[in-house]
Every structure is written in structure tokens, then in C-alpha cells.
Image (cartoon, rainbow, N blue to C red):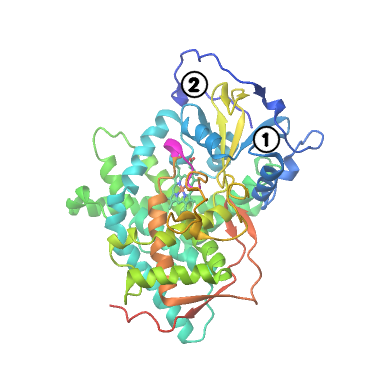
Amino acid sequence: MNETIASDELGLATEAPAELRYTRRIEDLPGPKGQPFVGNALQLSGRQMHQKFTAWVREFGPMFRLQVFGHTIVIVSDAATAHSVMRERPDGFRRNGGLKQIMNELHIGGVFTAEGAAWRKQRKLVMSGLNAEVIRNFFPTMVRLTERMLERWKRALAEGRAIDLRRDLKCMALDTIVGIAMGHDIDAVNQDGDPLQRDIDNMFQRLGNRTTAAFPYWRYFKLPVDRAAERSFADIETRVTEFIHHTRERMEQQRHLQRKPANMLEAMIAASEDPESEFTDEELVANAILSVIGGEDTTANSIAWMLCLLAQNPAAAAALAAETDLVLGDAPLPREWEQMKAFPYLEAAHSETQRLKAVAPYLGLTANADCVVADTFIPKNTAIIVATAGEGRDEAQFPGHERFRPERWVAELREPEEEDPSRKLFPFGGGSRLCPGRFLALTEIKVVVAMIMRNFELEPDPTAPPAKELLNFFMAPSSVPVRLKLRVPPAGELR
Ligand code: HEM
């Protein structure tokens, strides 16, 4: 895990650090016993690796250590320590080299793997494409895509066909992210087997396999699946380059789009055409691809987990349906941008979902210099893992922690003795590398879940296999054992 990166590449200050004060070293931290040579590596591989972290947080507390092939990894999960680490980026900590290497081998780069000056420049580019104004301009398209999903589901129920929620939510998220990141409607919801979707799935499969593998076999030999992932990347790159080319042409003809971009790609192209920006075409392509990778499964998995939890908790589902009815009246889904501020219970249900089912359960970082974290001396190049669900399963922090109870996130609804938990979890990371897509994700989650709750009842599906947690790079449910049933009385006819 340890590696060397030149300090100018990281944009680090070269001044001598102030004297470090601490009372313990990593060797003083608790941690699970490992095996000779491999240490804890075998306990860390596999699709349930994140659950191992959660179990260890319970056993060893908010800060503990692991050994992997002779390298030390420190895990932190309490809010104060995690925020102190995340805040020190990009100068104090960089993304973990192991993850970066795996992503770079799959040609996934952009802002996520960049550091120092290159990160600052690309972060600006990505933020220009994901700011509130761009999302607001894209909102009518998002509503249209959600309406299309509603129509499909209503048709399926009228014709007595089963709804495959896992598939449909993924397609819907892909349509949305390709819509905003590329300005193109691929209609994955209605067109089975879009090549872009197949290629993105291939990349995720490889990312998931490689980040949870005990041994990096692909560096020594390639299996057919590894060659297929390489072809998929080449195809995605060709498609994205075409999207960029067409968008540039359209923006040449419609100059007003420079001032009022309707999607992320237009906004990034407008930013890159500023003579002072120095954004290259490679950066544009890499970040458009990264956004599609970062924006599909995160949102789809979050909605899927929320539906699973709501189906098992009818009181919470009823409270959410009541909120949706109140906000939407007769309308079958939110169509007004201002309505996005009117769903406190839905936002709480999302936070509670991330507490129990964090879709990005940990961040892998590396210390750029000797430093002190929570009174512990951390030598330069030590790997640190931040568990983003924090102490979400700690009974002292979240009384009744096994229960799905959105009320704990709403000031007027929580028990008088309960604290505001909002800083205790960090599902979108934190500090200057906080997820730039969170506003888009929350908007999409609100539109889609409000549409579902306004039009359907959720029922557990006893014939479907239970939803198991699978780390597929992001944490996904293995199935969505939920049935949709049209609500009686149904929402008014589409207006
Ligand atoms: C529920 C949905 C989502 C979750 C839970 C999530 C979570 C995260 C997390 C934990 C990080 C790491 C932050 C850090 O290092 O502090 C991250 C970074 C990132 N996310 Fe998201 N994300 C979501 C949706 C999205 C969407 C929709 C997009 C794209 C359009 C996106 C694009 C990115 C990018 C580009 C980064 C890298 C930022 C950087 O390194 O500066 N994410 N996300």
C-alpha cells in the first residue's frame, strides 16, 4: 500500500513541519489478529469486506489497525477524527495508491484520482458542470425521464407483467447521468442492451472484483473478462468523444448555451473554452466518463436500499406517502424546482438509508507526511481508511440502531433527549473533496422516490431472494425484494 509520490506533484508546501505532539503510536492501537505473512489480507477480500470493517469497529472501537502483507492500515470511524483527516486534503492526505492504481489500470481517472494542482484544476471543471444552476436547468429533463419510468411501470402492472426494480432503477439512473453528463437520451429504461450500459456494467464488475481481490492476478495474466473490460473502456471513450464533438457543434450554433448550459457537458465545455482555464480535451473526456461511473450505481443503489427498508417498515412508508401527498397534491410526481425543498421526511429517510446501507462505505487515503491523528503518530505514507457510515451502528450514538427510523433526522420528530446526528455520518465524504455529485444525487433521489410513493404501495416480495450487501465497488443490494402495487386512490391523471 505504501508508495512514493514527488511532493511537487502533490502541490505540497516544502516548509519543515511543526513539532508533532502525541501520546500513542500505531502499535498501541488495538486490531484483529492476522496470519503469518499475509496479515489480515484474507479477512479483507471478498464482496462483504465492508461488513468486516463494521464488525471490527464494534469490536475494537473507532480507531484500530490492520496489517496487509507487512503494510499497516489505520481505520477511523468516529466523526471528529474522520473529519479531521478529510479536512486536511489534498495537502495532508491523498487517495490511496492501491485504489488509484486499479482505477488507472482500467483507465478511469479524472478528478477522483488526481492530486495537488491537477486535482484543483479538474475539481473546478467538474464543479462548473454540477453546480445548482446546471442541475436546475436539467431538472425538467429529469422529471421527463422519471415520468417515462412511471408510464412503464403503470403499463406493466396493467398488463400483469412483473417489474424488475433492480434493473429499472439502474437504467433510470443511467439515463439521468448520461442525460446530464453527455446531454444525450439513451433511453436505457426502454431499450434493452444499450452498449453503453453493458460497457459500464463491465467496468463496474472489474472494479468490484479488483478492489476486493486478495491478489492482483491481472498484473501477471489477463482473463477474457479483463480483455472485455479493456474493450469496454475503448468503446466508452469513443462514445463520449462523439458526444463531446456533437455538443461542441451544437454550442457553436446556439451561442446562448455558453451562458446558460442545460447540462454538465455543456457547462464543462463552456468552462474549458475560457482562454484562462487551460482544460484539455483529455480532462474533459476523463471527467465525463468518471461522472457516469460515479453517478449511476451510487444513486440507483441508494434508491434500491431505501425501497427495501421502506417495504419492511410500513409506518415509515406511510409517513413518507403522507408527505408526498401533501407536497404533490394531485400531481403524480414533482414538477416544480421549488418542491425540492419540501421533502424533509424523504431527506431523513435517505440519511437513515445511508446510515444502515452506506453505498460508498469507506474512503481509502494515504498520509502525505508524518502527522498526528487522534493523538496517534502516523508516519508518512501510512494508509488510512475512513468508514463513511461512521458510528452509525453504535448504540450509544444511535439508540435502537438496528431500526430504520427516519424520525431521528428530523428536529421536530426526534426524541427530546436525542442529539442531531447530521455530523455523525459522512456518506458523501468531506472536506474539499466532498462528493461534487451530491446535489444532483439528492435531487434525483427525491424526484424518483416521491414519484414512487405518490403512485405505488410497497410490499415485501416473499418469493424474491433476500437483499444481501454486495461490494461491487459501490455497495449494492443483491436483489430488491419489493413489489409495487398501484395506490388506491391513485394519483391524478398526468397533467
Ligand atoms: C448517493 C449518491 C452518491 C454517494 C453516496 C457518493 C459518495 C461519494 C463519496 C463518499 C466520495 C468521496 C468523497 C471524499 O473523498 O471525501 C465521492 C466523490 C465523488 N463523487 Fe460521489 N456520490 C454519489 C453520487 C455522485 C454523483 C451523482 C456523481 C456525478 C455526477 C458523483 C461524482 C463524484 C466525483 C467526481 C467524486 C470525486 C471528487 C474528488 O475527488 O474531488 N457522485 N462520492
Q: Position of residue 161 (x, y in %)?
A: 52, 83
Q: Nearer the viewer, residue 279 or 381?
A: 381
Q: Which mark is residue 7?
A: 2
Report whether 318 appears left or right of 207.
Answer: left
The answer to whether one can see residue 189 in this image is no
Up the image or down, 272 lies above or below 338; here it is above
Mark nearest the camera among 2 and 1 is: 1
**Residue 250 placement (x, y as % from top left):** 24, 55
Amino acid type assigned to the residue bearing label 2 in the image: Ser
Is 468 in front, or is 246? 468
Residue 339 as seen in the image, left or right of residue 30? left
Q: Is residue 175 magenta?
A: no
Q: Is mark 2 within 8 Å of ligand 1?
A: no
CB atoms of marks 2 and 1 within 8 Å:
no
Other-residue count near label 2 (Cα within 10 Å), few / some / many at <14 / 14–19 / ≥20:
some
Of residues 271 and 374, the one nearer the viewer is 374
Nearer the observer, 398 or 92 = 398
Segment tinted magenta in the rendering: 427-433
**Residue that mark 1 sits on:** 64
Distance, label 2 to label 1, CA atoms, is: 28 Å
Q: In the picture, which quadrant includes the C terminus?
A: bottom left
First in sequence: mark 2 vs mark 1? 2
Residue at 43%, 54% in the rendered image = 411
